[in-house]
């Protein structure tokens, strides 16, 4: 599988985290870490290699006028 910088799943765009994981356990650990930081995560696997794709919706913030 060629590494894609972005993945579209369920109508949403996910971005690759830039790491080619050589084992599933490392990818799963990275995915769990991203989930703890409120990211949506998709993991693609091919053989022993895994790719982690993430997305997070930016929440609107209000800025007080000075």
Image: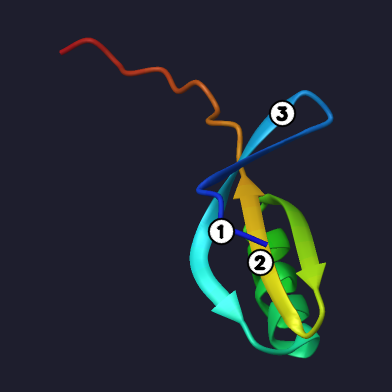
Residue ID at (64%, 54%): 53
Image coords of residue 14 (percent x, y): 63, 41
Residue ID at (55%, 55%): 16
In the image as oriented, which residue stretches furthest toward the front?
1
| Rendered-image quadrant of the C terminus | top left
Q: Secondary structure at mark 2?
A: strand
Q: Compared with residue 48, is residue 54 higher up or lower down, i.e. above or below?
A: above
Q: CA distance from mark 2 to mark 1?
A: 8 Å
Q: Nearer the viewer, residue 13 or 61?
A: 13
Q: Are marks 1 and 3 in contact (CB under 8 Å)?
A: no
Q: Compared with residue 4, is residue 59 higher up or lower down, i.e. above or below?
A: above
Q: Secondary structure at mark 1?
A: loop
Q: Quick check: 59 left or right of 25?
A: left
Give the residue number, with chain letter if any, for mark 1.
Answer: 3
Q: CA distance from mark 2 to mark 3?
A: 17 Å
Image coords of residue 19 (percent x, y): 51, 73
Classify mark 3: residues with Cα within 10 Å, few (<14), some (14-19) or many (20+). Answer: few
Residue ID at (66%, 50%): 39
Quarter of the view holding residue 61 = top left
Q: Are marks 2 and 1 in contact (CB under 8 Å)?
A: yes
Q: Nearer the viewer, residue 30 or 61?
A: 30
Quarter of the view holding residue 37 = bottom right
Q: Nearer the viewer, mark 2 or mark 3?
A: 2
Q: Quick check: 58 left or right of 46?
A: left
Q: Nearer the viewer, mark 2 or mark 1?
A: 1
Give the residue number, with chain letter if any, for mark 3.
Answer: 12
Q: Compared with residue 17, is residue 24 higher up or lower down, i.e. above or below?
A: below
Give the residue number, with chain letter if any, for mark 2.
Answer: 51
Q: Nearer the viewer, residue 34 or 26?
A: 26
Q: Quick check: 65 left or right of 16?
A: left
Image coords of residue 17 (percent x, y): 52, 61
């Amino acid at each position: 599988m060629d590494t894609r910088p972005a993945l579209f799943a369920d109508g949403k765009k996910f971005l690759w985290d830039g790491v080619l994981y050589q084992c599933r356990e490392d990818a799963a650990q990275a995915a769990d870490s991203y989930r703890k930081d409120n990211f949506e995560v998709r993991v693609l696997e091919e053989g022993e290699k895994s790719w982690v794709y993430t997305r997070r919706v930016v929440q609107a913030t209000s800025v007080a006028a000075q």
